[in-house]
Image (spheres, rainbow, N blue to C red):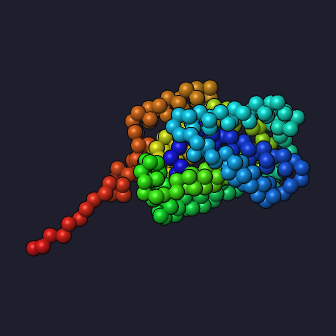
Amino acid sequence: GAGRLDFGPTFFFALGGYTAALLSRSGASVFETFLAALAVGLLVGLALSPITIVSRGVYYTLITFILPFVLYEVAYWRSDIFGAETGIPGVQPLVNILSPTIAEIYYFYISAAFVLLLMFIVDKVLRSKYGVMMGVLNEDEDVANMYGINTKFIKIVVYTLTSGLISIAGWFTAHYYMSFTGTLYLSPEFLTLILLASVLGGKGAVYGALIGSYFVVGVREVFRVFLGGLSLIAFFGISLALLFLLPEGLWGLYRKRRYREYVPTIKVRRKL
């Protein structure tokens, strides 16, 4: 919605995780850490949002690509606070259930509820007049300005809100593992998985990103269990093959069967 290719989601992911872990270790409740992680993500996102205005193209991508590495270095510099590679232990679990199997089921449905709620909100926004303006901005920012769209305001709002939402993902991860090792998620490998899920799902497709995420996580886990040390080779081999075979991603398979949802057609009534 901001017309920018952002390589910095891991920065806000780690920011939310660190906030939740540090506060939870200090005695804060799960709800309090949720509000704090969301607030920190929104405030930092708002503070950094002017970069969507002053830079574009490869310069913007490089700036957002540097952000995770800055936090990575800070985590090692202040390892007494952030734990560096050892992480921050003692985080309160999201659900207090002794059985690991039942706890996993609860975590799955809680995460699915968050995802579905987010998809519902995004879908409603994209179908509104603001979604149309964001679409014009994504296609051509100069044209959007010519039509009188306040592109600066849209970019700031979109960047700020999405930063807060990504921080919630870090909050969830910290409480899920009951510890948080931010350096693990600030690495280029984790960013690669995020970008791979987005591209495999469908470039620019909101629901495609959802499908791609579950596909990447599911296939990696299945390969890890059955293939052991060969799992990474098999996973990235299949991923590369799908990138060539499915130019529109997994969501493109659905759109090909229901082409009228994305190819405009005109029906003409003929007089007999």
Count of labels in the image: 0
227 sits left or right of 187 in the view: left
Answer with the quarter of the image where residue 161 lies.
bottom right
Image quarter hosting the C terminus = bottom left
Farthest-out residue, bottom? 272
115 sits left or right of 261 in the view: right
Residue 98 in percent (x, y) is at 81, 52
130 sits left or right of 253 in the view: right
Compared to residue 24, the image places residue 129 above or below, namely below
Residue 201 in percent (x, y) is at 49, 44
Please tell me which residue lies in front, 246 or 53: 53
Can residue 48 be seen by looking at this rendering? Answer: yes
Residue 52 in percent (x, y) is at 58, 45
Answer with the quarter of the image where residue 216 lies.
top right
Answer with the quarter of the image where residue 260 lies.
bottom left
Compared to residue 162, the image places residue 266 above or below, namely below
Q: Residue at x 46, y 44 (%)?
A: 203
Q: Residue at x 39, y 47 (%)?
A: 253
Residue 166 in percent (x, y) is at 65, 49
Please tell me which residue lies in front, 256 or 130: 130
